[in-house]
Amino acid sequence: MKDDKDLLDAKLSGNNELDHSNTDRIEEVKKRSLKAIFLEVLVYIAIFYACIYIIPIYVIQRTVVDGPSMENTLFNEENLLVEKISYRVDALNRFDIIVFYPYGHDVEEYFVKRIIGLPGETVQIIGSDINGEVLEEDYGKDPITYSGIAEDPITLGENEYFVLGDNREISFDSRYEEIGIISKDNIGGRAILRIWPLNKFGLID
């Protein structure tokens, strides 16, 4: 009888050890699951933060055209995507459409215009002359009748640009003293894609 009792105690003891082992495993799985959930939440928070803050500030953002100064290329309330990386590591090109802050980044007002004059060039508007040569381009909606500050030659310094709107008769651009020459530091990005309206979706020329 004693042997049977010892055997029973041993079996019960083994069951208890098994139960403890299973409990430990369940707790370990729970801890791993909680850790995985926590890490997943952190990843989603990081992605959300990047989408809301990092990408619009440093990579790409949506911009809305305000007014008719870029007709017939861009029209009022059209939505554009502006990329903010390439122009920082590479030179901007003539005829690129840029978004810039004429009064500095601390002021929210921004303009959308086309680059006409590049760093080191001399700009004088007499039939759109640049460096003494007539600029060959088909972007302007109308001939230029107002030269503004570019009536006399203007030599652009390093990282300085001269911009015009395609709707030359009404565009408020580098011809006006209030805007003037655009420093690269005040450029917010290069417009690359029209995303609205959908029937005009595509790259911007």
Image (cartoon, rainbow, N blue to C red):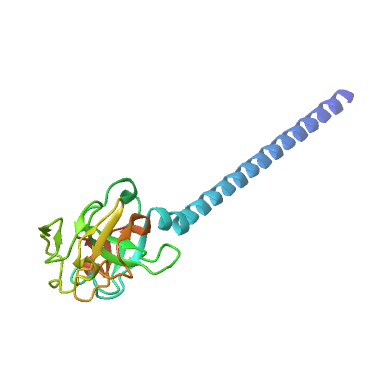
- Which image quadrant for residue 143? bottom left
| Residue at (16% x, 65% y) in the render | 125
In depth, the one of 146 and 173 nearer the eye is 146
Quarter containing the C terminus = bottom left
Q: Residue furthest top?
A: 3
The residue lying at 71 percent from left, 40 percent from top is: 23
Q: Quadrant of residue 31?
A: top right
On screen, residue 105 above or below 89: below
Pinpoint residue 157: horizontal percent, then vertical percent: 29, 53
Q: Residue 134 location, x and y as percent?
A: 10, 60
Residue at figure coordinates x 55%, y 50% from the top left: 42
Residue 86 position in % (x across, y down): 31, 49
Which residue is the extreme one toward the front?
Answer: 152
* Number of marks: 0
Which quadrant of the structure image shows residue 97? bottom left
Query: Residue sitting at 24 percent across and 51 percent down?
Result: 120
